[in-house]
Image (tube, helix red, strand yellow):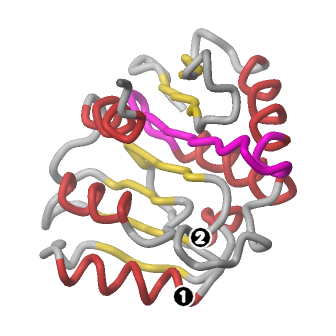
Amino acid sequence: MVDLVGLHKHFILEHLAEGDVAVDFTMGNGGDTLFLSKTVGESGRVYAFDIQEEALISTREHLEANGAPQNYELICVSHHRVKEFVKEPIKAGMFNLGYLPRSGKKSITTMRETTMPAVEAAIELLAPDGALIVAIYPGHEEGALEGEMLREYFKTLSRFRICASEFHILNSPTSPYFFLIEKSPRCKE
């Protein structure tokens, strides 16, 4: 069976290396933050965002328990404010849209109003040959709407600057899926 999280990591590892800068746009419980932190190592930098203090606490505990390098900054604000905190180009970014896993707070989710500016900012910050993973959870209404909105947006991007791909399990329409956004290595922005 397809392991979507394994695919996320596979695609990110094609672009991210020791010493790079990465962003976890939806920190959650810190799984992606830990992966990014260990990938960029001591000489790299990771910024992680979430609006819930509970996510920062859970992530900090997860990073410390798993020996993450001290290369991260955990930020308790919405991901759409990323450019207030991240000033340098990034080689990778990860979004897991939806709600905080294991929190019991399914009413607090990412929202289209902040997700779109966060994704636009992420693409602007993306260095040449950088990549973004945007995981969509269509099993709840806002998640389905976020996915539709982003699909339409990604279709408008210049294929000479950005390669936008979508990965689905076809015979399971409410299963999570993801977009892979890759910036051309020749992009001089």
Task: State which quadrant residue 88 falls in.
Answer: bottom left
Question: Could you say whether the residue bearing mark 1 is in a helix, strand or loop?
Answer: helix
- Position of 59 relative to 43 (above/below): below
Distance Cα–Cα, label 2 vs label 1: 9 Å
Instruction: Pick the quarter of the image with the N terminus.
Output: top left
Kindly identify which residue carries mark 1.
Answer: 54
Whether the residues at callouts 2 and 1 have beta carbons within 8 Å, the answer is yes
Q: What span is colored magenta in the figure?
A: 126-144
Kindly identify which residue carries mark 2.
Answer: 100
* First in residue order: circle 2 vs circle 1: 1
Residue 20 % position (x, y): 27, 51
Dot label at residue 20: none
Residue 108 % position (x, y): 75, 73
How crowded is the residue under tag 1: few (<14 C-alpha within 10 Å), some, or many (20+)? some
Task: State which quadrant residue 43 falls in.
Answer: bottom left
Residue at x 82% of width, y 24% of height? 152
Q: Amino acid at mark 2?
A: Leu
Residue at x 39% of width, y 69% of height? 30
How crowded is the residue under tag 2: few (<14 C-alpha within 10 Å), some, or many (20+)? many
Q: Is residue 97 left or right of residue 70?
A: right
